[in-house]
Amino acid sequence: MLATVFHTPSMEFFPQAAEPVARLHLLVVDADPAIRSACAEIASGLGYAAETTADFQQARSLLRSSAADILLVNLPQTGSRQGLELIAEVKLLYPRIAIVAMTSSGLVNTAVEAMRCGANDYLTKPFTMDDFSGVLERANQAVLTDTASRQLREQLRASQGLGAMIGRSPEMEKVYRILSKVAQSTHPVLILGESGTGKELVARTIHAYGPNGQKPFLPVDCGSLVPTLIESELFGYVKGAFTGANRSKDGLLVSAESGTVFLDEIGELPLDLQAKLLRALQEREVRPVGATHRVPIKARIVAATNRDLSAMVENGSFRKDLFYRLNVVNLRLPSLRDRREDIPLLAAHFLDRISRERVGKFTLSDEALRTMMRYDWPGNVRELENSVERACTMSSGPILELGDLPTQLQNTGLEARRITLEAGQPAENGATSAAPVATLADLEKHAILSAIRTLHGDKLQAAKLLGIGKTTLYRKLKEYGIADPLAE
């Protein structure tokens, strides 16, 4: 029986020898009893709880009465659209279910349409057992990822990180371990990392968890102030030191008392000010601008930069002695692309804050979250926060869809769809081919029209299925010059 279902030269594959996966529930819908039996047998051997049916209506009843995690549905070769209609309904009613469409080798367009209707993956018959187990594994991972993201959305805040910092990845656990030790000292700390990784937040955490957490935390952006202003801000000045100095003022290094002065973008500090800062750190005293006396300081210095200070030392643009003075403890923050497992947690944290501010709960659709996990985030956590805020502003409902995200993320999501459709399309020799079947614009147009037809003209539901806003859908139809999609 297995030989009629799986295309394989030998029967040396034993499912029982495979590593069992999490026990998820699989529902197989196919009129062929041999295929149903074989799929159920292999899935059971892989650790799944398998159930089968030959009838689409019965499949609907089973989905209502029991919790299925993965739906494997065969699309008939005839003109029947029952399989596509079932996929669209399941995607709409049970978005947590991972859907795999099963087609014959000559029905590539049907597989593409199934993906547009909401299928997560597709399988072309005849297929090997490795193909079948691979599809189940991908569906399994999608279900587990979605489940984990929903759980993370429900448990936020302090237990998910250190203080105001969010993240539970191994990279962040390493940062927490260093912070817990550094915070108890008063040594200078140099924080390195790309723009948007949260360097100031780390500095505030070091201060808050330190012995002088009740003292002032005073940030200075060395890259946004002119040198004369930085000098007077740090060291203070006396009355008459320069035009407009109508009274004396203590600098931040003095007014911080035993607190923390955070020197952000320390790499932008001019060389002459680097020399004065070095002397202040060495002597633990400063001379205010225009003064002849010196004032003792007790402030702790935490500096940060996204530049390569070692390279700047080599080319002479940063003082070596100041670098060593600041670099007593070196803390490098990971980029967001290096700790992708924290993305759902961070997104949920921002959504929770925005939901409380706007008195309305926002959640991410599965496709939007998967797109966020694929995106490289050159702007790191700051870009992620801005993207979530933008999506909440643009969304017409509580669920944030792919179309609500910024353009660069939408492009990432559409490209992922295109690659999914292209990879595994059967070539003439039976092998897979990555050759595109259409341009991205054509695929997008086909997806929109197919979704509207499947849902019998319901544009609002079609927009939800496609993961775009209704305004975007109407704009696209206008661009295509289509007034009545059902007539096309």
Image (cartoon, rainbow, N blue to C red):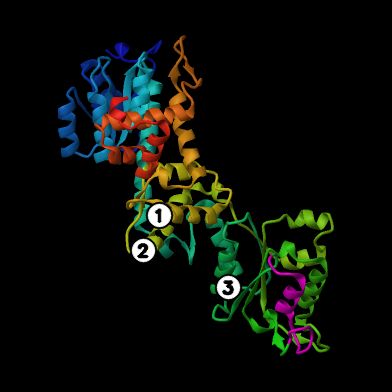
What number is the disc on residue 358? 2
Q: Residue type at mark 1?
A: Cys
Give the vertical position of 8 relative to 225 (above or below). Answer: above
Q: Are marks 3 and 2 in contact (CB under 8 Å)?
A: no
The image position of residue 111, as x and y in percent, is 35, 23
What residue is drawn where x is 40% and y is 54%?
Answer: 392
What residue is drawn where x is 83% and y is 54%?
Answer: 315
Mark 3 or 1, which is nearer the eye?
1
Q: Are marks 3 and 1 in contact (CB under 8 Å)?
A: no
Side of 457 relative to 181 (left or right): left
Instruction: Find the magenta span and give its range.
Output: 224-245
In the rendered image, the quadrant that contains the C terminus is: top left
The image position of residue 394, as x and y in percent, is 41, 52
What number is the disc on residue 207? 3
Q: Considering depth in this image, is 448 or 47 the residue closer to the camera?
A: 448
What residue is drawn where x is 80% and y is 61%?
Answer: 318
Query: Between disc 3 and disc 2, whose residue precedes?
Result: 3
* Mark 3 Cα shell of 10 Å, populated few (<14), some (14-19), many (≥20): many
Residue highlighted by disc 1: 392
Q: Hey, which quadrant is residue 313 in on the image? A: bottom right
Disc 2, SS: helix
Q: CA distance from mark 3 to mark 1?
A: 32 Å
The image position of residue 435, as x and y in percent, is 51, 20
Q: Residue type at mark 3?
A: His
In the rendered image, the quadrant that contains the N terminus is: top left
Disc 3, SS: helix
What residue is drawn where x is 84% and y is 58%?
Answer: 316
**In the image, is residue 422 part of the stretch drawn in magenta?**
no
Query: Between disc 1 and disc 2, whose residue precedes?
Result: 2
